[in-house]
Amino acid sequence: MSKEKSKGWVIVGVHILAWALLGFVLMFYQPLSWGIKLPFVFWAKQLISIALLVGIFYFNMLYMVPSFLLKNNASAFALWIILSVVVMLVISKFVDQQLHVHEQMDALMTQAGPSRRPRGVIDGILLMILLLVLGVSTSLSVLQRWQKDAQIRESVEKQNIATELALLKAQINPHFFFNTLNNIYALTFTDVPVSRDAILKLSRMMRYLLYETQQDTSLLSQEISFIKDYMELMKLRLQSNTTVVFTESKPDREYSVAPMLLLPFIENAFKHGISAMHQASIRVDLDIADGFLTMVVKNHIFRDKDVLNVESGGIGLVNTQRRLDLLYPGKHELLIDDNINDNTYQVLLKINLV
């Protein structure tokens, strides 16, 4: 038996149990407590009333509420409520007359001895039960629609987030690979061992991008290896006046992280933190402990025209902040310090990975 079919049978069972309890409490418990033998026609009327209430309940919940109330046709729905009350009371009165319920009950009460209470034109108890049934069925129908709409909104939102993340992740700058290939080509004439090592690093990066970033998360160790290969390849293009330092702590265990989430901050450091004429430094510190990833990226920033424009484009910090908001809502902290006086730029990123 499938999960959906099993769930459906459970719901049917709950409805049957609820109606059994409701019918017993509202229609049978009080007459049974009188301690007298009631005629068959009385119980027949109670069963007919229960059947009518069940029919009104589901007709109201499955058809009237979705067709009128939830489509902002309140006047037609109010007319239905009034009409259902009138019809229910008329049918109850008709059943009384056809089965002679009141005559037999009056005769029974006279024999039993209790004083006879005046009987009104409207059955007040039945009216209150009917209003209760209509209220519950309306509430259930509205609640089901809200739940269904919420599920649809959640599904659409998840789909939009997945699409947006795919687009953001797809914006990895291809210029890096083209320029790196050119540098490796030049190295093949001057330093063959270094060029081989660079090709190996580049192939690892390509493999990671093609296969490991297709899922929602990747191993943090793989993400760090990708960053280290990226920085090593970037060093091939730097002059001697630029210092690059990378430090990392040994994690207490393996963690998962959204792929390509850390690179944009390092890419930004290489984009704006190197110069062809001035001394520059780029420092990246990674600390992983107790389920938290802390990354600090600090670099000089050059705003004059001698900046070596290593890359143009990239994922961009704005898009990366958007990814953080989507993937780690309430579980990350991002602080950016752009110090104009010291010409330094520092990013502090802290992510709760558990």
Image: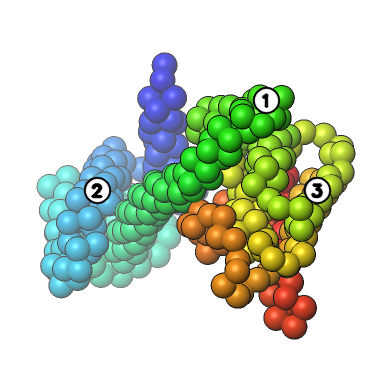
Residue under pointer 2: 62
Q: Which of 105 and 153 is in front in this view?
A: 153
At 84% from the left edge and 39% from the top edge, which residue is drawn?
A: 251
Q: Position of residue 61 (x, y in %)?
A: 27, 51
Q: Mark 3 points at which residue?
A: 246
Looking at this view, name the residue that lies furthest to the front.
189
Q: Helix, strand, or loop for circle 2?
A: helix
Mark 2: amino acid: Leu
Percent position of residue 85, x then y: 20, 63
State which quadrant residue 338 falls in. Answer: bottom right
Are circles 3 and 2 on residues that touch, CB within 8 Å? Answer: no
N-terminal label among 3 and 1: 1
- Judge the density around disc 1: few (<14), some (14-19), many (≥20) Cα neighbours within 10 Å: some
In this figure, which residue is indicated by the disc labeled 1? 192
Which residue is drawn at the image coordinates 66% and 32% (left, top)? 190
Between 218 and 188, which is closer to the camera in this rendering? 188
Q: What residue type is labelled 1?
A: Val
Q: In this view, does 342 lie to the left or right of 163?
A: right
Discs 3/1, front: 1
Asked if residue 209 shows in the view, the reply is: yes
Figure quadrant of the C terminus: top right
Mark 3–mark 2 distance (CA, rounded to whole Å): 64 Å
Q: Which residue is drawn at 26% across and 42% down?
A: 51
Q: Distance between the residues labelled 3 and 1?
A: 25 Å
C-alpha span from label 2 to label 1: 76 Å
Q: What element carries label 3?
A: strand
Residue placed most toward the observer, 9 or 98: 9
